[in-house]
Amino acid sequence: MRIDPVVTASYAVTLSAPWIVYASIRLVRRGRYDAHRLIQSVHLVMCILAVLALELRIRLGGGSGMFVGRAPPELQLLARRVLGVHIAIAVATYLVWAWLAVASRRRYGERLPGSFSRVHRRLGMFVFGGLCFTAASATAMYVLVTYRS
């Protein structure tokens, strides 16, 4: 079976997200707030574009049923469940990440670290955990829909 380039590119961006966010967090600990902000903003936009491209590819290909239908018949129920959990966690993660990016950009002119720092740190850790889970569940989906015995 031929691997779809849009699916593979989206998967690569999803896999890179936790690593890039982790590196960005390390920059904050060294006081490099501008670099952190730039990396977070650029990677958030890249991730959103990758998700939109994947969603368009799935819709043009017949929807999620066709996508799940690529899994072996005995694994399709599992694939559907993994996909449901993957989508729920990914959407929640991206919504919190986008909100955090906008809220942080608005407050960035204040003295750092500021009153928003505690909320930012906690939500940032939620986003990091969500990105790790999303990468793991994307890996499970990628394996399920490309697996051939």
Image (cartoon, rainbow, N blue to C red):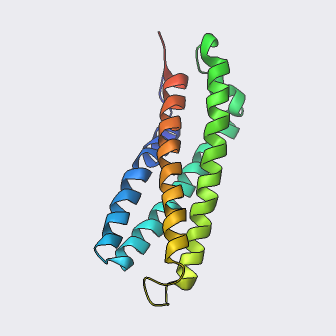
Residue 116 point in image, percent of width and height? 54, 79
Rendered residue at 68%/38% (across/down): 60
The one nearer the camera, 55 or 19, is 19
In which image quadrant can residue 83 be found?
top right
Tag count in the figure?
Answer: 0
Q: Is residue 56 visible?
A: no
Identified at 64% across, 59% down, the residue is 95
- Is residue 118 among what the camera can see? yes
Name the residue located 57 percent from the left edge and 69 percent from the top edge: 100
Task: Report x, y in % for residue 118.
Answer: 51, 73
Residue 22 appears in which quarter of the rendering? Answer: bottom left
Q: Residue at x 38, y 79 (%)?
A: 34
- 85 left or right of 133? right
* Vertical relation: 58 (above or below) 91: above
Q: Residue furthest left?
A: 30
Q: Residue furthest bottom?
A: 110
**Is 63 left, or right, of 4 in this rendering?**
right
Question: Where's residue 137, x and y in %?
Answer: 53, 36
- Give coordinates of residue 36: x percent, y percent: 39, 71
